[in-house]
């Protein structure tokens, strides 16, 4: 299954979660670091690659 942007739903959910966490980082409600963000983004890309 794909969403309207042609992205697999599983990848879309992971990206949405990543976006939400990044938003929290920007506004100080979540004390994640950029190292965490980069690591999580790499994980999303790796999972997406496995789905393709």
Image (spheres, rainbow, N blue to C red):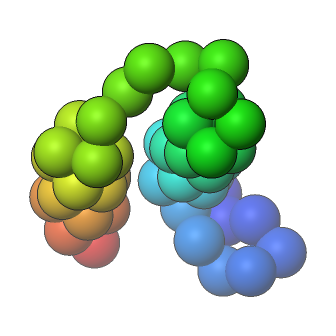
Residue 33, compared with residue 12, is above or below; it is above
Residue 13 in percent (x, y) is at 61, 42
Q: Residue at x 23, y 55 (%)?
A: 38
Residue 51, compared with residue 14, is above or below; it is below
Q: Residue at x 30, y 36 (%)?
A: 33
Residue 22, compared with residue 48, is above or below; it is above
Residue 31, compared with residue 40, is above or below; it is above
Give whichever of 17, 27 is nearer the camera.
Answer: 27
Q: Where is the N terminus found, in terms of image quarters?
A: bottom right
Q: Residue at x 71, y 36 (%)?
A: 27
Residue 32 in percent (x, y) is at 37, 27
Q: Residue at x 44, y 20 (%)?
A: 31
Left or right: 21, with 20 as reference point: left
Give whichever of 33, 16 is nearer the camera.
Answer: 33
Does residue 45 show up? yes
**Residue farthest right in this picture:** 4
Give whichever of 35, 44 is nearer the camera.
Answer: 35
Does residue 20 show up? no
Residue 24 in percent (x, y) is at 66, 32
């Amino acid at each position: 299954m794909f969403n309207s942007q042609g992205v697999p739903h599983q990848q879309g959910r992971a990206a949405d979660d990543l976006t939400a966490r990044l938003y929290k980082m920007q506004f100080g409600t979540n004390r994640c670091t950029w190292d965490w963000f980069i690591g999580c983004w790499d994980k999303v890309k790796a999972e997406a690659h496995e789905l393709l």
